Amino acid sequence: MRAWLPDARGHRRLFSALSIDALGTGLFLPFSVLYFTATTDLTLGRVGLALSIAALIRIPATPASGMFCDRFGARTTVIVSNVTQAIGFLNYLLVDSSFAHLLVAAIVVQVGNSAFWVAYPALVHDVAEGKQQESWFALITTLRHAGLGVGALGASLAVAVGGKNGYFAIVAVNAVSFAVAAVLTRLDAARGAHPAGDSSSPTAGNGLDDSDLPEPPASWATTLRDRPFLGFVALNFGLALLSLAFGLAVPVFLVDTVHLPPWIPGTVLAVNAVLSAAGATPVGAAITGRRRHRSLLASQAVVGGAYVVVLCCAYVRSAAFSICLALASVVLMTVGELIQSLVVSPIVNDCATAASRGRYNSLSQMAFSIGDVVTPVLMTTLLAHGPAATWLPMAALALVDMLGITLLAKRLPAMRRRVNQADPTEPDSRLIEADGL
Protein backbone atom coordinates (compact mmCIF):
# COMPACT_ATOMS: atom_id res chain seq x y z
CA MET A 1 0.00 0.00 0.00
CA ARG A 2 2.92 2.36 0.70
CA ALA A 3 4.04 1.97 -2.91
CA TRP A 4 0.60 3.13 -4.01
CA LEU A 5 0.89 6.46 -2.18
CA PRO A 6 2.14 9.44 -4.21
CA ASP A 7 5.54 11.01 -3.84
CA ALA A 8 4.57 14.09 -1.81
CA ARG A 9 8.09 15.44 -1.33
CA GLY A 10 8.16 19.16 -2.04
CA HIS A 11 4.49 19.57 -1.12
CA ARG A 12 4.46 19.08 2.63
CA ARG A 13 3.41 22.69 3.14
CA LEU A 14 0.40 22.17 0.89
CA PHE A 15 -0.63 19.02 2.76
CA SER A 16 -0.21 20.89 6.03
CA ALA A 17 -2.34 23.74 4.69
CA LEU A 18 -5.16 21.41 3.69
CA SER A 19 -5.01 19.63 7.04
CA ILE A 20 -5.09 22.89 9.00
CA ASP A 21 -7.95 24.14 6.83
CA ALA A 22 -9.92 20.97 7.65
CA LEU A 23 -9.05 21.25 11.35
CA GLY A 24 -10.56 24.72 11.51
CA THR A 25 -13.63 23.62 9.58
CA GLY A 26 -14.06 20.68 11.93
CA LEU A 27 -14.00 23.08 14.85
CA PHE A 28 -16.83 25.22 13.55
CA LEU A 29 -19.02 22.83 11.55
CA PRO A 30 -20.80 21.07 14.46
CA PHE A 31 -21.67 24.44 16.02
CA SER A 32 -22.35 26.52 12.90
CA VAL A 33 -25.88 27.41 14.05
CA LEU A 34 -25.42 27.09 17.80
CA TYR A 35 -22.60 29.65 17.76
CA PHE A 36 -24.93 32.45 16.68
CA THR A 37 -27.78 31.49 18.99
CA ALA A 38 -25.33 31.26 21.91
CA THR A 39 -23.35 34.46 21.28
CA THR A 40 -25.83 36.86 19.63
CA ASP A 41 -29.33 38.19 20.22
CA LEU A 42 -30.56 36.78 16.90
CA THR A 43 -33.34 34.20 16.94
CA LEU A 44 -32.88 30.72 15.52
CA GLY A 45 -35.20 31.57 12.64
CA ARG A 46 -33.22 34.65 11.62
CA VAL A 47 -29.93 32.78 11.89
CA GLY A 48 -31.29 30.00 9.71
CA LEU A 49 -32.62 32.50 7.16
CA ALA A 50 -29.27 34.29 6.88
CA LEU A 51 -27.35 31.05 6.46
CA SER A 52 -29.85 29.77 3.88
CA ILE A 53 -29.60 32.94 1.79
CA ALA A 54 -25.81 32.72 1.95
CA ALA A 55 -25.99 29.09 0.78
CA LEU A 56 -28.06 30.20 -2.23
CA ILE A 57 -25.31 32.66 -3.16
CA ARG A 58 -23.02 29.65 -3.70
CA ILE A 59 -24.91 28.82 -6.90
CA PRO A 60 -23.85 31.93 -8.89
CA ALA A 61 -20.55 32.13 -6.98
CA THR A 62 -19.46 28.68 -8.17
CA PRO A 63 -19.22 29.41 -11.92
CA ALA A 64 -17.69 32.80 -11.12
CA SER A 65 -15.03 30.97 -9.13
CA GLY A 66 -14.39 28.75 -12.14
CA MET A 67 -13.70 31.79 -14.31
CA PHE A 68 -11.40 33.23 -11.64
CA CYS A 69 -9.53 29.94 -11.41
CA ASP A 70 -8.98 29.77 -15.17
CA ARG A 71 -7.81 33.37 -15.23
CA PHE A 72 -5.46 33.39 -12.23
CA GLY A 73 -4.68 29.71 -11.61
CA ALA A 74 -5.77 27.11 -9.08
CA ARG A 75 -3.14 27.93 -6.45
CA THR A 76 -4.00 31.63 -6.41
CA THR A 77 -7.69 30.81 -6.18
CA VAL A 78 -7.15 28.51 -3.19
CA ILE A 79 -5.11 31.22 -1.45
CA VAL A 80 -7.77 33.85 -2.14
CA SER A 81 -10.48 31.46 -0.92
CA ASN A 82 -8.64 30.93 2.35
CA VAL A 83 -8.13 34.65 2.90
CA THR A 84 -11.78 35.33 2.07
CA GLN A 85 -12.99 32.76 4.58
CA ALA A 86 -10.62 34.11 7.23
CA ILE A 87 -12.18 37.56 6.76
CA GLY A 88 -15.66 36.08 6.94
CA PHE A 89 -14.99 34.23 10.18
CA LEU A 90 -13.34 37.26 11.76
CA ASN A 91 -16.60 39.09 11.03
CA TYR A 92 -18.53 36.30 12.72
CA LEU A 93 -16.77 37.36 15.92
CA LEU A 94 -18.25 40.86 15.53
CA VAL A 95 -21.85 39.83 14.83
CA ASP A 96 -24.10 40.94 17.69
CA SER A 97 -27.75 41.57 16.87
CA SER A 98 -27.51 42.72 13.25
CA PHE A 99 -29.12 40.37 10.75
CA ALA A 100 -27.45 42.28 7.88
CA HIS A 101 -24.00 41.86 9.44
CA LEU A 102 -24.52 38.12 9.81
CA LEU A 103 -25.81 37.84 6.25
CA VAL A 104 -22.84 39.68 4.74
CA ALA A 105 -20.34 37.68 6.79
CA ALA A 106 -22.04 34.40 5.87
CA ILE A 107 -22.01 35.33 2.17
CA VAL A 108 -18.28 36.10 2.35
CA VAL A 109 -17.66 32.70 3.95
CA GLN A 110 -19.77 30.88 1.36
CA VAL A 111 -18.10 32.65 -1.57
CA GLY A 112 -14.68 31.69 -0.21
CA ASN A 113 -15.79 28.12 0.40
CA SER A 114 -17.19 27.86 -3.11
CA ALA A 115 -13.93 29.11 -4.61
CA PHE A 116 -11.94 26.57 -2.60
CA TRP A 117 -13.93 23.56 -3.82
CA VAL A 118 -13.67 24.72 -7.42
CA ALA A 119 -9.91 25.26 -7.30
CA TYR A 120 -8.89 22.41 -4.98
CA PRO A 121 -9.29 19.56 -7.55
CA ALA A 122 -7.46 21.60 -10.19
CA LEU A 123 -4.63 22.32 -7.74
CA VAL A 124 -4.30 18.61 -6.96
CA HIS A 125 -4.07 17.94 -10.72
CA ASP A 126 -1.31 20.54 -10.99
CA VAL A 127 0.84 19.26 -8.13
CA ALA A 128 0.31 15.67 -9.29
CA GLU A 129 1.23 16.73 -12.82
CA GLY A 130 -1.85 14.86 -14.02
CA LYS A 131 -0.47 11.51 -12.81
CA GLN A 132 -1.75 9.20 -10.09
CA GLN A 133 -4.47 11.69 -9.23
CA GLU A 134 -6.47 9.13 -7.28
CA SER A 135 -3.50 8.53 -4.97
CA TRP A 136 -3.17 12.23 -4.28
CA PHE A 137 -6.89 12.60 -3.59
CA ALA A 138 -6.80 9.57 -1.29
CA LEU A 139 -3.93 10.95 0.78
CA ILE A 140 -5.50 14.40 1.01
CA THR A 141 -8.89 12.89 1.89
CA THR A 142 -7.26 11.02 4.77
CA LEU A 143 -5.58 14.18 6.06
CA ARG A 144 -8.71 16.31 5.70
CA HIS A 145 -11.02 13.84 7.45
CA ALA A 146 -8.49 13.44 10.25
CA GLY A 147 -8.42 17.21 10.60
CA LEU A 148 -12.21 17.40 10.62
CA GLY A 149 -12.42 14.73 13.31
CA VAL A 150 -9.80 16.30 15.55
CA GLY A 151 -11.42 19.69 15.06
CA ALA A 152 -14.87 18.40 16.03
CA LEU A 153 -13.50 16.85 19.21
CA GLY A 154 -11.59 20.01 20.04
CA ALA A 155 -14.69 22.13 19.53
CA SER A 156 -16.76 19.95 21.85
CA LEU A 157 -14.06 20.26 24.51
CA ALA A 158 -13.82 24.04 24.05
CA VAL A 159 -17.56 24.52 24.46
CA ALA A 160 -17.76 22.15 27.43
CA VAL A 161 -14.93 23.92 29.25
CA GLY A 162 -15.26 27.51 28.09
CA GLY A 163 -18.98 27.97 27.53
CA LYS A 164 -19.63 31.19 25.59
CA ASN A 165 -15.92 31.98 25.46
CA GLY A 166 -15.39 28.52 24.00
CA TYR A 167 -17.64 29.44 21.08
CA PHE A 168 -15.63 32.59 20.44
CA ALA A 169 -12.40 30.57 20.62
CA ILE A 170 -13.70 28.12 18.02
CA VAL A 171 -14.42 30.87 15.49
CA ALA A 172 -11.17 32.72 16.22
CA VAL A 173 -9.08 29.58 15.75
CA ASN A 174 -10.98 28.79 12.54
CA ALA A 175 -10.20 32.26 11.15
CA VAL A 176 -6.53 31.85 12.04
CA SER A 177 -6.46 28.38 10.47
CA PHE A 178 -7.59 29.80 7.12
CA ALA A 179 -4.93 32.52 7.28
CA VAL A 180 -2.21 29.97 8.08
CA ALA A 181 -3.46 27.70 5.28
CA ALA A 182 -3.20 30.60 2.83
CA VAL A 183 0.40 31.30 3.83
CA LEU A 184 1.43 27.63 3.65
CA THR A 185 -0.22 27.19 0.24
CA ARG A 186 1.69 30.21 -1.03
CA LEU A 187 4.97 28.88 0.38
CA ASP A 188 4.48 25.39 -1.03
CA ALA A 189 7.18 24.41 -3.50
CA ALA A 190 4.52 23.84 -6.19
CA ARG A 191 6.80 21.50 -8.05
CA GLY A 192 5.29 20.71 -11.44
CA ALA A 193 2.37 23.11 -11.08
CA HIS A 194 1.12 24.58 -14.33
CA PRO A 195 -0.17 28.11 -14.52
CA ALA A 196 -3.61 28.68 -15.93
CA GLY A 197 -3.66 28.10 -19.63
CA ASP A 198 -0.36 26.18 -19.73
CA SER A 199 -0.27 24.07 -22.84
CA SER A 200 1.53 21.17 -21.20
CA SER A 201 -1.69 19.76 -19.82
CA PRO A 202 -3.62 17.12 -21.77
CA THR A 203 -6.56 18.00 -23.91
CA ALA A 204 -9.99 16.82 -23.02
CA GLY A 205 -9.67 13.10 -23.46
CA ASN A 206 -8.60 13.06 -27.14
CA GLY A 207 -5.26 11.32 -26.60
CA LEU A 208 -3.20 14.23 -28.01
CA ASP A 209 -0.63 16.43 -26.32
CA ASP A 210 -1.26 20.17 -26.34
CA SER A 211 2.25 20.73 -27.64
CA ASP A 212 0.99 19.29 -30.94
CA LEU A 213 -2.22 21.34 -31.14
CA PRO A 214 -2.90 24.91 -30.05
CA GLU A 215 -5.18 25.02 -27.03
CA PRO A 216 -8.38 27.02 -27.56
CA PRO A 217 -9.01 29.86 -25.13
CA ALA A 218 -11.32 29.03 -22.23
CA SER A 219 -14.88 30.27 -22.51
CA TRP A 220 -18.30 29.24 -21.29
CA ALA A 221 -19.41 28.78 -24.89
CA THR A 222 -16.88 26.03 -25.56
CA THR A 223 -17.39 24.49 -22.12
CA LEU A 224 -21.17 24.30 -22.49
CA ARG A 225 -20.84 22.72 -25.94
CA ASP A 226 -19.21 19.68 -24.32
CA ARG A 227 -22.46 17.71 -24.11
CA PRO A 228 -20.98 14.44 -22.80
CA PHE A 229 -19.47 16.35 -19.90
CA LEU A 230 -22.77 18.13 -19.23
CA GLY A 231 -24.25 14.65 -18.97
CA PHE A 232 -21.60 13.86 -16.37
CA VAL A 233 -22.55 17.02 -14.46
CA ALA A 234 -26.17 15.80 -14.37
CA LEU A 235 -24.93 12.42 -13.17
CA ASN A 236 -22.84 14.16 -10.51
CA PHE A 237 -26.01 15.78 -9.17
CA GLY A 238 -27.43 12.30 -8.60
CA LEU A 239 -24.24 11.25 -6.82
CA ALA A 240 -24.29 14.39 -4.68
CA LEU A 241 -27.96 14.01 -3.78
CA LEU A 242 -27.44 10.48 -2.51
CA SER A 243 -24.43 11.54 -0.47
CA LEU A 244 -26.08 14.60 1.06
CA ALA A 245 -29.35 12.80 1.78
CA PHE A 246 -27.67 10.17 3.92
CA GLY A 247 -26.02 12.56 6.35
CA LEU A 248 -29.08 14.80 6.54
CA ALA A 249 -31.98 12.34 6.77
CA VAL A 250 -30.67 9.05 8.16
CA PRO A 251 -29.89 10.35 11.69
CA VAL A 252 -33.38 11.91 11.91
CA PHE A 253 -35.00 8.74 10.59
CA LEU A 254 -33.20 6.49 13.06
CA VAL A 255 -34.33 8.54 16.05
CA ASP A 256 -37.81 9.73 15.03
CA THR A 257 -39.06 6.73 13.05
CA VAL A 258 -37.04 3.73 14.21
CA HIS A 259 -36.94 5.13 17.79
CA LEU A 260 -33.30 4.30 18.39
CA PRO A 261 -31.46 6.01 21.28
CA PRO A 262 -30.57 9.71 20.82
CA TRP A 263 -26.85 8.93 20.83
CA ILE A 264 -27.20 7.13 17.48
CA PRO A 265 -26.85 10.21 15.19
CA GLY A 266 -23.56 11.22 16.79
CA THR A 267 -22.30 7.65 16.58
CA VAL A 268 -23.30 7.37 12.92
CA LEU A 269 -21.47 10.57 12.02
CA ALA A 270 -18.42 9.58 14.09
CA VAL A 271 -18.18 6.17 12.41
CA ASN A 272 -18.46 7.86 9.02
CA ALA A 273 -15.66 10.30 9.89
CA VAL A 274 -13.33 7.62 11.24
CA LEU A 275 -13.90 5.29 8.29
CA SER A 276 -13.44 8.16 5.82
CA ALA A 277 -10.10 9.06 7.38
CA ALA A 278 -8.86 5.49 7.69
CA GLY A 279 -10.42 4.05 4.55
CA ALA A 280 -9.42 6.41 1.75
CA THR A 281 -6.04 4.83 1.07
CA PRO A 282 -7.18 1.15 1.34
CA VAL A 283 -10.18 1.86 -0.89
CA GLY A 284 -7.97 3.65 -3.39
CA ALA A 285 -5.52 0.77 -3.42
CA ALA A 286 -8.38 -1.70 -3.93
CA ILE A 287 -9.70 0.05 -7.05
CA THR A 288 -6.29 0.80 -8.56
CA GLY A 289 -6.02 -0.56 -12.09
CA ARG A 290 -9.79 -0.77 -12.57
CA ARG A 291 -11.65 1.37 -15.06
CA ARG A 292 -12.97 4.53 -13.46
CA HIS A 293 -16.51 3.96 -14.73
CA ARG A 294 -16.54 0.46 -13.30
CA SER A 295 -15.43 1.85 -9.95
CA LEU A 296 -18.27 4.36 -10.09
CA LEU A 297 -20.72 1.57 -10.92
CA ALA A 298 -19.52 -0.31 -7.86
CA SER A 299 -19.90 2.81 -5.72
CA GLN A 300 -23.53 3.24 -6.72
CA ALA A 301 -24.29 -0.43 -6.14
CA VAL A 302 -22.85 -0.08 -2.63
CA VAL A 303 -24.72 3.20 -1.98
CA GLY A 304 -28.00 1.68 -3.18
CA GLY A 305 -27.39 -1.24 -0.84
CA ALA A 306 -26.79 1.18 2.03
CA TYR A 307 -30.22 2.73 1.54
CA VAL A 308 -31.89 -0.68 1.38
CA VAL A 309 -30.24 -1.54 4.71
CA VAL A 310 -31.50 1.74 6.18
CA LEU A 311 -35.02 0.85 5.06
CA CYS A 312 -34.75 -2.53 6.78
CA CYS A 313 -34.13 -0.74 10.09
CA ALA A 314 -37.79 0.28 10.12
CA TYR A 315 -39.05 -3.30 9.92
CA VAL A 316 -36.82 -4.95 12.52
CA ARG A 317 -38.27 -5.36 16.00
CA SER A 318 -34.99 -5.73 17.86
CA ALA A 319 -33.38 -2.38 18.70
CA ALA A 320 -29.97 -4.06 18.89
CA PHE A 321 -30.40 -5.49 15.40
CA SER A 322 -31.54 -2.09 14.11
CA ILE A 323 -28.41 -0.50 15.52
CA CYS A 324 -26.28 -3.15 13.79
CA LEU A 325 -28.09 -2.47 10.51
CA ALA A 326 -27.61 1.28 10.94
CA LEU A 327 -23.88 0.84 11.46
CA ALA A 328 -23.69 -1.51 8.47
CA SER A 329 -25.39 1.13 6.32
CA VAL A 330 -22.80 3.69 7.43
CA VAL A 331 -19.97 1.38 6.44
CA LEU A 332 -21.51 0.78 3.00
CA MET A 333 -22.22 4.46 2.45
CA THR A 334 -18.71 5.47 3.47
CA VAL A 335 -17.14 3.01 1.05
CA GLY A 336 -19.36 4.27 -1.77
CA GLU A 337 -18.58 7.91 -0.99
CA LEU A 338 -14.85 7.24 -0.83
CA ILE A 339 -14.85 5.62 -4.27
CA GLN A 340 -16.77 8.59 -5.67
CA SER A 341 -14.48 11.15 -4.05
CA LEU A 342 -11.38 9.47 -5.47
CA VAL A 343 -12.71 9.03 -9.01
CA VAL A 344 -15.01 11.94 -9.84
CA SER A 345 -12.48 14.79 -9.58
CA PRO A 346 -9.85 13.06 -11.76
CA ILE A 347 -12.54 12.46 -14.38
CA VAL A 348 -13.48 16.15 -14.35
CA ASN A 349 -9.83 17.23 -14.50
CA ASP A 350 -9.11 14.93 -17.45
CA CYS A 351 -12.18 16.09 -19.36
CA ALA A 352 -10.90 19.67 -19.28
CA THR A 353 -7.89 21.46 -20.70
CA ALA A 354 -5.49 23.46 -18.54
CA ALA A 355 -7.24 26.65 -19.64
CA SER A 356 -10.75 25.42 -18.79
CA ARG A 357 -10.21 23.25 -15.70
CA GLY A 358 -11.68 25.87 -13.39
CA ARG A 359 -14.89 26.09 -15.41
CA TYR A 360 -15.22 22.31 -15.63
CA ASN A 361 -14.74 21.89 -11.89
CA SER A 362 -17.19 24.70 -11.18
CA LEU A 363 -19.89 22.90 -13.19
CA SER A 364 -19.16 19.71 -11.29
CA GLN A 365 -19.35 21.55 -7.96
CA MET A 366 -22.68 23.10 -8.96
CA ALA A 367 -24.19 19.67 -8.31
CA PHE A 368 -23.32 20.03 -4.62
CA SER A 369 -24.28 23.71 -4.46
CA ILE A 370 -27.74 22.93 -5.83
CA GLY A 371 -27.92 19.73 -3.78
CA ASP A 372 -27.33 21.71 -0.58
CA VAL A 373 -30.47 23.71 -1.39
CA VAL A 374 -32.65 20.88 -2.71
CA THR A 375 -31.82 18.04 -0.32
CA PRO A 376 -33.29 19.44 2.94
CA VAL A 377 -36.66 20.16 1.31
CA LEU A 378 -36.73 16.88 -0.58
CA MET A 379 -35.78 14.66 2.35
CA THR A 380 -38.07 16.30 4.89
CA THR A 381 -40.93 15.85 2.43
CA LEU A 382 -40.11 12.20 1.83
CA LEU A 383 -39.66 11.45 5.54
CA ALA A 384 -43.21 12.65 6.16
CA HIS A 385 -44.52 9.87 3.89
CA GLY A 386 -42.93 6.91 5.65
CA PRO A 387 -39.83 4.68 5.32
CA ALA A 388 -40.58 3.08 1.96
CA ALA A 389 -41.43 6.43 0.34
CA THR A 390 -38.17 7.83 1.66
CA TRP A 391 -35.56 5.17 0.96
CA LEU A 392 -36.84 3.26 -2.07
CA PRO A 393 -36.52 6.38 -4.27
CA MET A 394 -32.95 6.78 -3.04
CA ALA A 395 -32.13 3.17 -3.95
CA ALA A 396 -33.83 3.69 -7.32
CA LEU A 397 -31.74 6.82 -7.92
CA ALA A 398 -28.61 4.74 -7.40
CA LEU A 399 -29.81 2.41 -10.17
CA VAL A 400 -30.47 5.41 -12.45
CA ASP A 401 -26.95 6.62 -11.72
CA MET A 402 -25.57 3.22 -12.73
CA LEU A 403 -27.41 3.44 -16.04
CA GLY A 404 -26.09 6.95 -16.61
CA ILE A 405 -22.53 5.85 -15.83
CA THR A 406 -22.77 3.02 -18.35
CA LEU A 407 -24.06 5.31 -21.10
CA LEU A 408 -21.65 8.17 -20.45
CA ALA A 409 -18.59 5.91 -20.30
CA LYS A 410 -19.05 5.26 -24.02
CA ARG A 411 -18.64 8.97 -24.77
CA LEU A 412 -16.16 10.15 -22.13
CA PRO A 413 -12.68 8.60 -22.48
CA ALA A 414 -11.73 10.05 -19.08
CA MET A 415 -14.27 7.69 -17.48
CA ARG A 416 -12.67 4.68 -19.13
CA ARG A 417 -9.14 5.33 -17.95
CA ARG A 418 -7.73 3.05 -15.30
CA VAL A 419 -7.63 4.29 -11.73
CA ASN A 420 -4.19 5.61 -10.83
CA GLN A 421 -2.63 4.20 -13.98
CA ALA A 422 -4.13 6.37 -16.65
CA ASP A 423 -1.73 8.25 -18.86
CA PRO A 424 -3.63 11.26 -20.19
CA THR A 425 -1.73 10.98 -23.48
CA GLU A 426 -2.83 7.36 -23.89
CA PRO A 427 -5.54 6.90 -26.56
CA ASP A 428 -7.48 4.74 -24.13
CA SER A 429 -10.62 4.52 -26.24
CA ARG A 430 -8.81 1.93 -28.34
CA LEU A 431 -7.96 -0.21 -25.34
CA ILE A 432 -11.54 -1.00 -24.41
CA GLU A 433 -11.98 -3.60 -27.12
CA ALA A 434 -8.53 -5.07 -26.60
CA ASP A 435 -8.91 -5.96 -22.95
CA GLY A 436 -12.58 -6.89 -23.07
CA LEU A 437 -13.65 -4.22 -20.57
Image: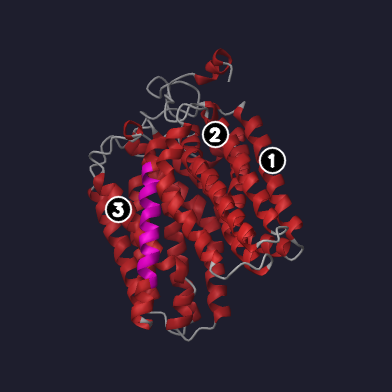
**Residue 58 colored in magenta in the image:** no
Mark-to-mark CA distance, 2 and 3: 29 Å
Marks 1 and 3 close (CB-CB < 8 Å): no
Marks 2 and 3 close (CB-CB < 8 Å): no
Q: x, y percentage for residue 290?
A: 50, 27
Q: Is the magenta stretch mostly helix, strand or loop?
A: helix
The foreground one among 267 and 288 is 267
Q: Can residue 238 be seen in this view?
A: no
Q: Which of marks 1 and 3 is in front?
A: 1
Q: x, y percentage for residue 28?
A: 41, 68
Q: Nearer the viewer, mark 2 or mark 3?
A: 2
Task: Name the secondary structure under disc 2.
Answer: helix
* Marking on residue 328: none
**Residue 143 colored in magenta in the image:** yes
Residue receiving disc 2:
295
Q: x, y percentage for residue 332?
A: 56, 46
Residue receiving disc 1:
399
Mark-to-mark CA distance, 1 and 3: 38 Å
Q: Earlier in the sequence, mark 1 or mark 3?
A: 3
Residue receiving disc 3:
17
Q: x, y percentage for residue 186?
A: 26, 50
Seen in the picture, residue 425 relative to 407 is either above or below; the reply is above
The image quadrant of residue 296 is: top right
Q: Tell me: 405 left or right of 158.
A: right
Provide the residue span drawn in magenta: 139-156
Q: Is residue 368 visible?
A: yes
Q: Earlier in the sequence, mark 1 or mark 2?
A: 2
